[in-house]
Amino acid sequence: MADAPPYAELDVMVTEHLTPIISDGLQRAGMAGADNGTIVKLLFAMPGMSLTYAWFKSGFPLPRHSHDADCLYYIIAGNLRLGTETLGAGDGFFVGSEVPYAYTPGEQGVELLEFRTAEQFNIRWLANNKGFWDKTVGAIAAQQSQWQGERPPSSL
């Protein structure tokens, strides 16, 4: 997995339908240190399928979004809150194409495998109000010191 390329170096996930509010929010989140709260790597891809490793650190504020490909998520370590459910290591969940969703990593963060029905897909951010992005940027800034020394939950 150490050799797997990060999404930032690839054109795997294409951002679509950006409004000025979402674009500004994403830019401010980046400046606040959003990249310090997550690691996402492509493990494998072929036509019609991809496998991704994702580590979202504790409390990472993942905004509501959707993709244009079905995805099966498998939790390797840590936990997350999805709706009213807390899911942990060994649990999984399915999100269909174009279905909006968000989850919140637990106190130790969460590591996941993402099995998608496409080698390239979109991401469509759905949080189109400034108040949401103000809160998200504040949460990212507040977590920076915590994220500095945080280790993946699989290493604990």
Image (tube, helix red, strand yellow):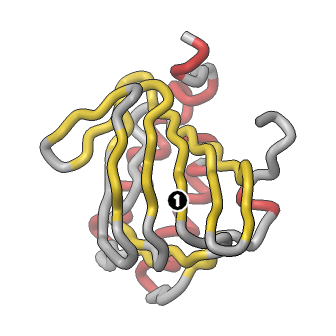
Residue nearer the viewer, 117 or 77:
117
Residue that badge 1 annotates: 29
Q: Tell me where residue 11 sits by quadrant.
A: bottom right
Q: Tell me where residue 27 sits by quadrant.
A: bottom right
Residue 135 in view (yes/no): no
Residue 41 in view (yes/no): yes
Side of 75 relative to 3 (left or right): left
Side of 32 relative to 99 (left or right): right
User: Where is residue 32 drawn, in percent x and y?
Assistant: 56, 52
Amino acid type at image mark 1: Ala
User: Where is residue 7 drawn, in percent x and y?
Assistant: 71, 59
Side of 140 relative to 93 (left or right): right
Residue furthest left in the image? 84
Q: Tell me where residue 86 sits by quadrant.
A: top left
Side of 148 relative to 70 (left or right): right
Q: Residues within 10 Å of mark 1 (few under 14, many from 20)?
A: many
Dividing the image into 4 quarters, which one contains the C terminus? Answer: top right
Q: Residue at the location (49% across, 44% down)?
A: 141
Dividing the image into 4 quarters, which one contains the N terminus? Answer: top right
Q: Residue at the location (39% across, 45% down)?
A: 139
User: Where is residue 26 drawn, in percent x and y?
Assistant: 52, 68
Q: Residue at the location (51% across, 25% down)?
A: 146
